[in-house]
Amino acid sequence: MKLIFISGPSGSGKTTLSNQIIKKIKNGIVLSTDNYYKTGLISKLLSKFIEGFFDRSISFNNKLFKKDFDFIYKNGIAIYDRYYDFEKKTIQKILKETNNISVLIVEGIFAKEFSNTLNNKDYYFLEIKTKKNECMKRVVQRDIKERGKDKKQAENDFLKSWDIYYEKFKPNRIKNNTNKFIIKKNTDLDHILKKLFN
């Protein structure tokens, strides 16, 4: 199974690129780390008191993500999708069977962190580089529409998220992998696909 990890700061276009790749190929699936945040009372409390909670490793349910990742990688099938509800701090589990998976894309701000835990697996790592103001515009629109934030809160949260990503996650430090590519906004999709599938 071909493994592709797509990382970048919030609003850089990770989900968009993942979906574009999936539309062009057959037998692929995307696992978004955004759907694997921790749930319940602890998550509700911590998100109120820890600045940038959803951009920090402490918010990521690595155990659940690894369970789904390992199942798909081992069996080549997925049984359901997961979707995180940011208002309720819950994960919805929706039955959706996908068979004969030959390409697994992991995308999200925790993609790099998870890829560094893999041993003896070959994979491609795409780091998306997008200008800060472009990312901010996308994130603010998304957070107002989908996460119930006002503009000022969305802007402040984005700036904190940007700093956390580039300070803590150190996106240029990728372990166990020589197939790393920097993807810029104007990079042609066909060019990306040639790197991945030729």
Image (spheres, grey):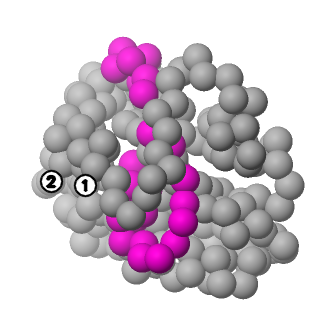
Q: Quick check: 110 above or below 6?
A: below
The front one of 41 and 114 is 114
For the residues labelled 2 and 1, the Cα–Cα distance comes to 9 Å
Side of 129 relative to 96 (left or right): left
Query: Where does the image place residue 185, in percent across and percent down from the top left?
Result: 54, 21
Is residue 102 in view?
yes
The front one of 35 and 31 is 31
Residue corresponding to mark 1 = 56
Q: Quick check: 191 above or below 41?
A: above
Q: Which residues are magenta?
A: 106-135
Other-residue count near label 2 (Cα within 10 Å), few / some / many at <14 / 14–19 / ≥20 = few
- Splitting the image into 4 quarters, where does residue 159 fall? top left
The front one of 14 and 118 is 118
Query: Where does the image place residue 95, in percent across and percent down from the top left?
Result: 75, 74
Of tags 2 and 1, which is closer to the observer? 1
Side of 135 relative to 55 (left or right): right
Question: Residue flagged by tag 1: what amino acid is it?
Answer: Arg
Please state the total of marks drawn on the protein image: 2
The front one of 132 and 52 is 132
Q: Secondary structure under badge 1?
A: loop
Q: Quick check: 33 above or below 20?
A: below
Please say if the residues under marks 2 and 1 sit with CB atoms less than 8 Å apart: yes
Q: Where residue 50 is drawn, which disc sits there?
A: 2
Residue at x-position 28% and y-position 49%: 173
User: Is residue 104 shown in magenta?
Assistant: no
Query: Where does the image place residue 186, in percent across and percent down from the top left?
Result: 58, 17
Residue at x-position 66% and y-position 35%: 192
User: Is residue 124 shown in magenta?
Assistant: yes
Question: Residue flagged by tag 2: what amino acid is it?
Answer: Ile
Residue at x-position 56% and y-position 81%: 70
